[in-house]
Image (cartoon, rainbow, N blue to C red):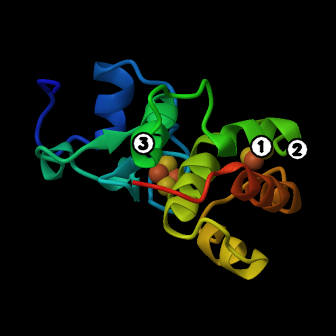
């Protein structure tokens, strides 16, 4: 549990970056349009650039840094893997170029697979629709999510 000193209306992104030193969530548009700042709040993808820190209260926030541990808890694993399967699949598929969208793409894909372990291509496209990649890597990101879905065991807690 962290004690935050920022003003209540401070965007969660600023607290994560400036107060807690977490570099996963990134500032992109600042308008909830691109997804680069996404985190999981109670397992739900949330745009941290427009989320006042006071609205979080005691809810759990997972950033890219904590994604492997979040995954391990979800799957009942005794030990967190080094990378979430989506992170590993992104590497395996060489899905990204500049990497700016990496955080949001992975957070959203992890949320998707936690709800729909074997999504169709249409479900992947629909889920990822609000995440922008200026390098246009969408086909490779879709392939990486499909690869990750094959890596994730069926049984979850
Ligand atoms: S920086 Fe938050 S959605 Fe773009
Ligand atoms: S890889 Fe460059 S923004 Fe997506």
Q: Mark 2 touching mark 3, by CB under 8 A? A: no
x, y percentage for residue 19?
28, 21
Q: Mark 2 touching mark 1, by CB under 8 A? A: yes
Task: Say if 14 sits above or below 119 in the image.
Answer: above
Cα distance between the residues tagged 1 and 3: 21 Å
Could you say whether the residue bearing mark 1 is in a helix, strand or loop? helix
Q: Is residue 102 left or right of residue 39?
A: right
Camera-nearest label, 2 or 3: 3
Task: Say if 118 sits above or below 21 in the image.
Answer: below
**Mark 2, residues whose alpha carbon is within 10 Å: few (<14), some, or many (≥20)?**
some
**Mark 3, residues whose alpha carbon is within 10 Å: few (<14), some, or many (≥20)?**
few
Cα distance between the residues tagged 2 and 3: 27 Å
The N terminus, quarter of image:
top left
x, y percentage for residue 48?
37, 48
Q: Nearer the viewer, residue 122 or 150?
A: 150
Q: Say if residue 21 shows up in the picture.
A: yes
Q: Is residue 92 left or right of residue 1?
A: right
Residue at 62 percent of width and 52 percent of height: 153
Q: Nearer the viewer, residue 151 or 51?
A: 151
Q: Earlier in the sequence, mark 1 or mark 3?
A: 3
The residue singled out by tag 3 in the image is 76
x, y percentage for residue 157?
39, 54
Residue at 42 percent of width and 42 percent of height: 76
Residue 89's disc is: 1
Could you say whether the residue bearing mark 2 is in a helix, strand or loop? loop
Residue 117's disc is: none
Could you say whether the residue bearing mark 3 is in a helix, strand or loop? loop
The residue singled out by tag 2 in the image is 93
């Amino acid at each position: 549990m962290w004690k935050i000193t920022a003003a209540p209306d401070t965007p969660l992104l600023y607290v994560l970056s400036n107060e807690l030193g977490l570099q996963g969530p990134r500032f992109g548009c600042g308008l909830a349009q691109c997804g680069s700042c996404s985190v999981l709040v109670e397992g739900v993808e949330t745009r941290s650039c427009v989320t006042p820190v006071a609205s979080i209260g005691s809810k759990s926030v997972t950033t890219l840094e904590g994604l492997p541990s979040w995954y391990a808890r979800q799957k009942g694993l005794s030990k967190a893997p080094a990378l979430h399967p989506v992170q590993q699949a992104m590497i395996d598929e060489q899905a990204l170029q500049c990497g700016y969208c990496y955080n949001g793409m992975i957070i959203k894909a992890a949320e998707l697979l936690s709800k729909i372990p074997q999504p169709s291509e249409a479900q992947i496209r629909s889920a990822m629709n609000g995440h922008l990649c200026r390098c246009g890597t969408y086909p490779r990101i879709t392939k990486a999510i499909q690869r990750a879905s094959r890596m994730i065991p069926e049984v979850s807690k």
